[in-house]
Image (tube, rainbow, N blue to C red):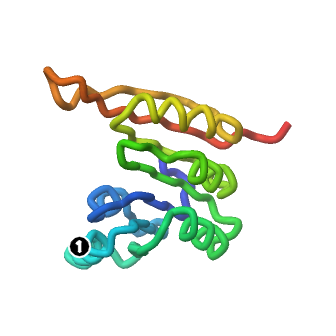
């Protein structure tokens, strides 16, 4: 994920904050958004241990918290990372993402069917620049896939 120019990074479905902590930087504000209270507590502890002053973990639903982050950071270049559960994003969160104005989205998926469904909805506002499967669990039918999307420009 090329974060050049990113001013705000939002990790949706951040869980205990592993990716959030790896992706955070002193160069931009980073937010982890998670709906499970115990995971947010663990993410806060990890951020504190890693001395990540520009990282803030937020408890709540992506459909509520992401628009709040966008409003607070109006006009800044926004990159969003999503790593949803197997059920994928669904229509509501895809609509929230499309309305967020995020410049770039990285989508990590453990279910190619829900990824395909969600990408078809996101494709209205984003160009899909790459989709790469990763066989992280050999001899199983489980494949992780990473898709990168970039906001379409108005013509």
Q: In the rendered view, would you say 95 is above or below 137?
A: below
Which sits in the foreground, 60 or 30? 60
Quadrant for residue 145, please give it. Answer: top left
Quadrant for residue 113, please give it. Answer: top left
**Residue at the image position 45 percent from the left and 50 percent from the top:** 82
Residue ranking furthest to the right = 155
The percent coordinates of residue 33 (x first, y second) are: 43, 66
Which sits in the foreground, 141 or 145? 141
Quadrant for residue 66, please give it. Answer: bottom right
Q: Is residue 68 left or right of residue 147?
A: right
The percent coordinates of residue 100 (x first, y second) are: 65, 58
Give the residue number, with chain letter if any, for mark 1.
42
Q: In the rendered view, would you say 153 is above or below 75?
A: above
**Residue at the image position 63 percent from the left and 76 percent from the top:** 72
Residue ranking furthest to the top = 139
Q: How many marks overall? A: 1
Residue 51, visible in the rendered structure: no
The percent coordinates of residue 122 (x first, y second) are: 62, 40
**Residue at the image position 49 percent from the left and 61 percent from the top:** 9
**Residue at the image position 58 percent from the left and 71 percent from the top:** 69
Label 1 crowd bin: few (<14), some (14–19), many (20+), radius 10 Å: some
- Element marked by disc 1: helix
Which sits in the foreground, 62 or 136? 62
Which sits in the foreground, 11 or 40? 40
């Amino acid at each position: 994920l090329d974060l050049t120019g990113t001013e705000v990074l939002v990790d949706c479905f951040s869980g205990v904050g592993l990716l959030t902590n790896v992706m955070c930087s002193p160069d931009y504000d980073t937010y982890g958004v998670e709906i499970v209270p115990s995971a947010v507590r663990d993410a806060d502890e990890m951020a504190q241990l890693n001395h990540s002053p520009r990282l803030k973990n937020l408890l709540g639903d992506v459909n509520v918290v992401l628009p709040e982050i966008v409003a607070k950071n109006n006009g800044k270049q926004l990159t969003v990372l999503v790593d949803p559960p197997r059920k994928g994003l669904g229509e509501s969160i895809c609509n929230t993402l499309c309305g967020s104005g995020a410049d770039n989205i990285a989508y990590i998926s453990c279910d190619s069917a829900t990824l395909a469904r969600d990408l078809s909805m996101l494709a209205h506002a984003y160009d899909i620049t790459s989709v790469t499967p990763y066989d992280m669990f050999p001899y199983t039918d489980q494949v992780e896939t990473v898709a990168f999307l970039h906001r379409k420009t108005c013509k």
